[in-house]
Image (tube, rainbow, N blue to C red):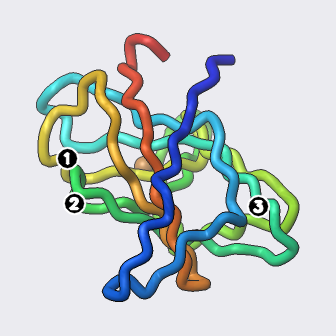
Amino acid sequence: MKKFFILCIGLFISQAIAAAQTEQIEVTNAYVRGLPPGVENTAAYMTLHNTGSEDLVLTGGEADFAESVSIHASENNNGMMSMVHKMNLTIPAGEQVVLESGGLHLMLSGLKGPLVNEEVSLTLKFQEGMTLTLRLPVISVLDE
Ligand SMILES: [Cu+2]
């Protein structure tokens, strides 16, 4: 399996930003699927490891390159794939939740431009009021 480095953007404290960056979630194998220009939606995949002793609830995210970031689950109903929007996703204390192609993913809708071989910032939001900003590589669908 390919391994990717994630650069967590450091904690930039600003009085204007109330949300605290969480260090309780460790992110690995994270990337955004790069699709041909003109495609308006794509997805982000990653493994979320809750290293803390309390559950955390992911409620979605934010990215300046997309209109919305939402949690989706792919479902296979008798061979028909469909996606279901989830309002939240619990990352149980001490456990890992895998977001992967064909399963859970972060749906990035309304892309504002093509994402080709670059790095993008994505902020995860948790119900507990915490956020986690990540730098994710864009991996072309052809290289997956
Ligand atoms: Cu989706």
Tell me the number on the disc at residue 67.
2
Residue 127: % across, % down: 57, 82
Cα distance between the residues tagged 3 and 2 = 27 Å
Residue at the spot of label 1: 111
Name the amino acid, label 3.
Asn
Relative placement, left or right, of 39 versus 141 is: left
Q: In this view, does 101 lie above or below 62?
A: above
| Image quadrant assignment for residue 43 | top left
SS for dot 3: strand
Name the amino acid, label 1.
Leu
**Of marks 3 and 2, the one in the foreground:** 3
Q: Which residue is drawn at 45% across and 43% down?
A: 44
The local crowd at label 2, few if under 14, some if 14 to 19, many if 20 or more residues have their Cα within 10 Å, is: some
Q: Which residue is drawn at 59% across and 49% down?
A: 104
SS for dot 1: strand
The local crowd at label 3, few if under 14, some if 14 to 19, many if 20 or more residues have their Cα within 10 Å, is: many
Q: Are marks 2 and 1 in contact (CB under 8 Å)?
A: yes
Residue at the spot of label 3: 50
Relative placement, left or right, of 110 versus 19 is: left
